[in-house]
C-alpha cells in the first residue's frame, strides 16, 4: 500500500462517524424518570432511547451509560480534560458557559410544589421568599430559587428525591422545587400521594439537553447534534419513544 493511499484512508476514517479515532465519550446520567432512570440492571428512559438512536445514526454501538447521583455527575462533567457528558440537563443562561450543548431533547417545566396544609399563595417571584424549601443540591430547582433571591436560610438542599419530598410532607419545609413530569413519576413510583401537594408556581419553562464537558471536541459535538437532529426529524420514531414512557411528545 502506498503512502498516498494510506493517507487517503486515514483521512476518510477521521470524518466518518464510528470509524474515527476520537476518544469515546463517557455518558453519565441520574435518576430523572421518565427521561433517564434505572430499571433493574438496565438504564432506560426517553433520553437514553434517543441517545441510542443517535449512536445508530453515527454508526456506533449502543451507548454505555453510567448512573450517578446528580451532584457528583454534574460536577464531574465540569472537571477539566474529562471526555464526558451529563444528561438530561436543563439549559439555562447560568449554565450555558459551563458546558457544550447538544439538544434539545425535550421540553421541561420546573415548578414549586407545596404541602396542601400550608395553603401557600405564590403569584410572583417576591412571594417565593415567604416560604421554606427542600431542593436537590445543584438541581435546576435550587438554582432558580437562588436566582430569585430566596434566602439561603430558607432552602435546605439534599441529594435524594424521597428525602426532599419527605421534608415537605412532614411539614419541616413548606415546598419543594422540581421538574413536574419527573416529580409526578417519582411520587407515583414510590407510593407518595401526589394529592398531598399542590403545584403553586412555575419557575421555568425550558428544554432538556445533553451537557458535554468543554474538553469534548467541537467535531464530536457537531456529530452528536447532527444525529439528534435526524432523530428529531422522525416524528413517528419520537412519538413511539415518548409513548413508551407515558409522555406526550
Image: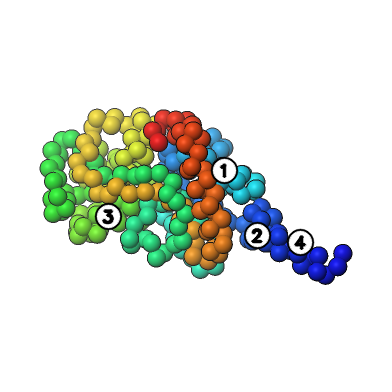
Label 3 – label 2 distance at C-alpha = 40 Å
Q: What element carries label 4?
A: helix
Residue carrying label 4 = 9
Q: Label 1, on which residue?
A: 52
- Please tell me whether mark 1 sits on a helix, a strand or a loop: helix
Q: Position of residue 131 (x, y in %)?
A: 16, 49
Disc with the residue nearer the chain's start (4 vs 1): 4
Q: In whole angstroms, how far apart are the C-alphas of marks 1 and 2?
A: 20 Å
**SS for tag 2?**
helix
Q: Earlier in the sequence, mark 3 or mark 1?
A: 1
x, y (%) of residue 195? 24, 30
Q: Distance between the residues labelled 3 and 1?
A: 31 Å
Residue that badge 2 annotates? 15
Circle 1 residues within 10 Å: few <14, some 14–19, many ≥20? some
Tell me which label, 4 or 3, sits earlier in the chain.
4
Quadrant of residue 6 within the rendered picture: bottom right
Closer to the eye: label 1 or 2: 2
For image coordinates 13% across by 54% down, the residue present is 126
Location of the N terminus by quadrant is: bottom right
- In the image, 94 versus 19, the foreground residue is 19
- Mark 2 is surrounded, within 10 Å at the Cα level, by few (under 14), some (14 to 19) or many (20 or more) other residues, namely few
Residue denoted by label 3 = 144
Position of 195 compared to 34: left or right?
left
Q: Is residue 11 above or below residue 179?
A: below
Viewer-nearest of labels 4 and 1? 4
Front residue of this view, candidates 229 and 75: 229
Amino acid at each position: 500500500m502506498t503512502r498516498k493511499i494510506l493517507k487517503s484512508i486515514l483521512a476518510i476514517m477521521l470524518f466518518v462517524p464510528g470509524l474515527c479515532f476520537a476518544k469515546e465519550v463517557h455518558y453519565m446520567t441520574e435518576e430523572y424518570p421518565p427521561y433517564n432512570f434505572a430499571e433493574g440492571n438496565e438504564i432506560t428512559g426517553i433520553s437514553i432511547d434517543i441517545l441510542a438512536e443517535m449512536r445508530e445514526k453515527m454508526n456506533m454501538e449502543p451507548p454505555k451509560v453510567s448512573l450517578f447521583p446528580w451532584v457528583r455527575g454534574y460536577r464531574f462533567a465540569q472537571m477539566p480534560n474529562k471526555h464526558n457528558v451529563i444528561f438530561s440537563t436543563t439549559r439555562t443562561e447560568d449554565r450555558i458557559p459551563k458546558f457544550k450543548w447538544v439538544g434539545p431533547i425535550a421540553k421541561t417545566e420546573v415548578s414549586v410544589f407545596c404541602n396542601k396544609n400550608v395553603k401557600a399563595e405564590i403569584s410572583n417571584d417576591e412571594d417565593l421568599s415567604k416560604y421554606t424549601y427542600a431542593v436537590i443540591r445543584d438541581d435546576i430547582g435550587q438554582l432558580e430559587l437562588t436566582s430569585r433571591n430566596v434566602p439561603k436560610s430558607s432552602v435546605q438542599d439534599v441529594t435524594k428525591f424521597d428525602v426532599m419530598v419527605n421534608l415537605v410532607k412532614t411539614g419541616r419545609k413548606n415546598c419543594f422545587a422540581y421538574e413536574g413530569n419527573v416529580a409526578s413519576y417519582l411520587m407515583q413510583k414510590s407510593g407518595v400521594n401526589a394529592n398531598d401537594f399542590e403545584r403553586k408556581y412555575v419557575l421555568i419553562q425550558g428544554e432538556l439537553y445533553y451537557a458535554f464537558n468543554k474538553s469534548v471536541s467541537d467535531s464530536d459535538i457537531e456529530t452528536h447534534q447532527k444525529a439528534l437532529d435526524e432523530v428529531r426529524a422522525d416524528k413517528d420514531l419520537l412519538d413511539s419513544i415518548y409513548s413508551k414512557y407515558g409522555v406526550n411528545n
